[in-house]
Image: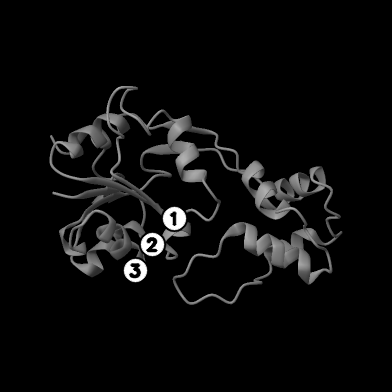
Amino acid sequence: MPVTFDLFGTLVDAARPADPAAAVGRELRERGVAVPDDWADAYAEPHVDAPEGAEVPLHAHVARALDSRGVSAPDNAARRAVTAAFEPDVTAREGARAAVERARERGPVGLLSNCSVPELARRSLLSADLRWATEDRDPLFDVVATSLSCGWRKPDSRAFEAVARQLDCDVNELTHVGDSDADAGIEAVGGRFIDVRETPLEALFR
């Protein structure tokens, strides 16, 4: 039975910047970028015309927001600033590792997370000690997919279809474990949704 897990709010609890625009602005200034005075407004405005359901990389949004104010961000400064502003501050939720390990006993296991920040999901897994079971064992996850890597955000069916392809299964075979209406999108493509708000991780796959 192929199983996928959501990350934030499901396997880990994450502390996010209280003011993302301010956090990104600080990191841009650290990299010599002249942040405009109305940065909060620029950050809040849409700048990338993307199809419905598509993920917009946050660093692309930031670069376009700066450009809208006539400011350039050389040397990949937008990406580096975004990555630094969202440095992982996460803790594994009670029962997270055990739930994934029990799922692995039943078949392939993947991670599918809505995340627009480069490498944040993988770095969060490492920070929460969830990427590897032990130093001498296989990875906990056969596939780690994000909306940034596949191009689509849950609940869009294309996000679930993308991770199913990577797990070499049909999307309607997936059981997806999550904590939001976006995760429940698996049901629209024939899969099964397990809501950790109703079924705690400790009770999964017993």
Residue annotated with mark 3 = 158
Q: Secondary structure at mark 1?
A: loop
- The quarter of the displayed image where residue 68 is located: bottom right
Tag 2–tag 1 contact (CB < 8 Å):
yes
Between residue 19 and residue 141, name the one nearer to us: 141
Residue annotated with mark 1 = 114
Q: Give left or right: position of 162 versus 41.
A: left
> First in sequence: mark 3 or mark 1?
1
> Whole-Å distance between the Cαs marked 3 and 1?
12 Å
Q: Secondary structure at mark 3?
A: helix
Between residue 177 and residue 113, name the one nearer to us: 113
Q: Position of residue 41 (x, y in %)?
A: 75, 64
Q: Height in image: 13 above or below 135?
A: below
Residue annotated with mark 2 = 154
Residue visible at 31% across and 33% down in the picture: 96
> Can you say which quadrant of the picture contains the C terminus?
top left
**Count of numbered tags:** 3
Q: Please name the amino acid that badge 1 sits on.
A: Asn
> Whole-Å distance between the Cαs marked 2 and 1?
7 Å
Between residue 184 and residue 109, name the one nearer to us: 109
